[in-house]
Amino acid sequence: MAAANDGQGRTLRYRVDGMDCPSCVGKLQTALGRIEGVSGVEVSFATGLLAFGAAGAAANGRAVEDKIRALGFTPTAIDNAAPRAPAPEDAKPWWRERKAQLVGFTGLLLAAAFVASLIVPAEAEWAYLAAALIGLVPVARRALTLIRSGSPFSIETLMAVAAIGAIAIGAASEAAVVVFLFAVGELLETVAAGCARQGIKALVSLVPRTTQREMGREANGILATVAVDDLAIGDIVLVRPGDRVPADGDIVDGASELDEAPITGESVPVAKAAGDAVYAGSINAGGVLRLKVTRAAADNTIARIIHMVETAQSSKAPTARFIDRFSAWYTPAAMVVAALVIAVPPLLFGGDWSVWTYRGLSLLLIACPCALVLSTPAAIASGIAAGTRRGLLLKGGAALEMLGKVKAVAFDKTGTLTIGRPQVTDIVALGGSEAAVLAEAAAVESGSSHPLARAILEAASARKVAVPAVAEASAIAGQAVLGRVGGALLAVGSPRYAAERGPLPAGLADRVAALEAEGKTVVVLLGEAGPRGLIALRDEPREDAAAAVAALRRAGVRPVMLTGDNRRTAEAVAGTLGIAVEAELLPDDKLAAIGRLKTQGPVAMVGDGINDAPALAAASVGIAMGGGTDVALETADAALLNNRVTGVAELIGLSRATLVNIHQNIAVALGLKGLFLATTLLGATSLWMAILADTGATVLVTLNALRLLRLLPVARPATAGAGPAHGHDHAHDHGAGHEEADDCCAHGACGSQPASVACGACRAPNQAAARTCSQCGQAMAA
């Protein structure tokens, strides 16, 4: 969280304890903005963080700290050089907060007054008066500070007026009870707000405080325990079994399985070996690893996620902005109405002044807008936290709201709906075995770095095929790779190259044509006597791509693939997934396609490459794959950290659940106020009931919002349909004569099989057919 300054001062950051409602943000921003030398004040209710530019006399922060304390909050300076927010254990427990102390103090005063009334009944009113006045002092002091700071219509002002009015009409005992209940209500709101902030605290705690670093940059150096914040790029650290990975890095030595669930939400541990990248916060479940740090603490995966979540929870959703504007005139209007309730009946209808003053004061307390103001940000913060726990990163409340309204989702193909690299799909042997064809082709390709060559070598490794040595390796640019294997000269090239060496047998030519019609790239293994076999390759759809397409259709959202790939390949993949497709699109064509889709309603775009960035920005909501480029991740409004395409449907489900939660909260806040307004005018509501109604509504909307933290949208089966296509060829040859499609951009989507189910015990996602939970080992419900 950063704040702007004038370039001549410095940026100061604080953690502010005691903020229990989004209205506290407005109070702080208004008050601090009036201090000379302070600029660019940014306050996050969700995280409790404050940042501002300070110059001149304000540069030391003392004036700001004094003002924060005067407003009833507790500031704690954060080291600007520290890359991480304060750890959870650094924060004070709720029972040590100033509000808890106020509850204890006013409670003792009320109890003392009650005891005094029993001992000396005739003096009971004086005892309650003393309790009410003493308990009112800190509230009135804060109200005066807020009035001088530009916030005259605060809950503190309403409370002070109501309590003073109650004392004036001889209801000192009720005034004392109201002061006590107000303190209790604020404490409950603080506790509830703390629960809503647990998501950020949990993220901070994922990274260990210390780690074992090798002294010096040479291998097997002496180990020293150092703070994770002190790690530098290039350092070598030791990660033992059971340890959390302290930093983003690459494995230098060792192999293990890493539990990446805290970062990606993926419940199945991922096998990692030398050369593989790992995330900070992952849990090493197996062997000892030596890790080379690739990102400093301030820039690791967890730090970036924390920053994005803080920014997201600090930004206001459209509904929240509307309610803020509404509450700006609602509170003063409520005070005017309360004044009319007090004055009009006695003046015009001969009503009793004490009766209508009492009712007007009760109305003042009921009119507090805290519950209404909290209704939307509490739900948005919980929704964002719920998504983050499952590897669904949202960058703001506006994106979370918009996702539930999208009518279409446009997908890129390569790297989004597909894995992003070719894989061997078919092997045709002529006279020998498939294993022999794969082994010989892998031997010839062993010196090439082309994606198709890597795919053939990976297939040989996966099938445990022994790859013989190759000699006299060479290449014919744009046509084939050659080499001598076991004394025989072999070539791996395109069907065109093979046909130039001699006509292909009729059956083999037909098989090549059939495989190419499926959108696959075919290479021919040639010997001195002619073709020895075929190998077909294609960038295959992700395992959950069909499920994602079906899930979107089920949700009433139209999926479509927008790709720069050639029509043949695009249609083959689209046919497999059952998704509409527009192929051979240049970046400008994709923007035009997004524009056409937006005429029918909001559109989400899902992509992973640099060429997807314009379309991601143009869409109503841009969603980037977690494994995509930094440009795509920065441009998008949301990201799928786990690279699961079904996450798109989960995001939409989460958004819709959040919108329902917001509507429920608003209904509770306004409904309770309307109910107690009626009972107040009828004389059935006492002052202490009024303050309980306000506090109860605030706590209810907070607890309702926290229900979102347990939400896990699940994809369910559905049938999928196909769609149209059109085209322009982007295929280009690789050095060995293989053709590979160059995907320019894309969008799309919806799914088919159940992707995952939540464990009833720990809520971890599991495969739909799982019998036991992969996280806690408990039996899964049928």
Image (spheres, rainbow, N blue to C red):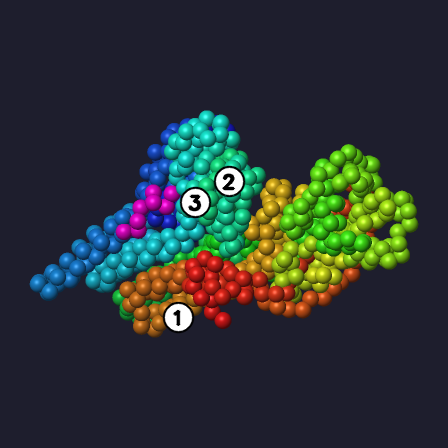
Which residue does the numbered mark 1 point to in the structure image?
A: 675
Q: Residue furthest front?
A: 487
Q: Secondary structure at mark 2?
A: loop
Q: Position of residue 664 (x, y in %)?
A: 47, 66
The residue labelled by disc 2 is: 254
Task: Kindly tell me whether residue 393 is visible in this rendering.
Answer: no
Left-right relation of 713 to 101: right
Where residue 633 is drawn, which disc sits there? none
Q: Is residue 249 above or below residue 561?
A: above
Instruction: Give the Cα distance between marks 2 and 3.
Output: 11 Å
The picture places residue 268, in percent across and down from the top left corner, at 52, 54
N-terminal-most mark, 2 or 3? 3
Q: Are marks 1 and 2 in contact (CB under 8 Å)?
A: no
- Tell me the magenta residue range: 87-95
Provide the secondary structure element on which disc 1 rests. helix
Which label sits in the foreground, 1 or 2? 2
Q: Residue at x 52, y 57 (%)?
A: 319
Instruction: Give the CA separation, mark 3 to mark 1.
Output: 59 Å
Mark 1 vs 2, N-terminal side: 2
Answer yes or no: do the residues labelled 3 and 1 have beta carbons within 8 Å? no
Query: Is 565 included in the stretch rendered in magenta?
Result: no
Amino acid at pointer 1:
Leu
* Residue 548 horizontal/vertical position (percent): 63, 60
Q: Secondary structure at mark 3?
A: loop
Amino acid at dot 2: Gly
Residue carrying label 3: 241
Residue toward you, 254 or 227: 254
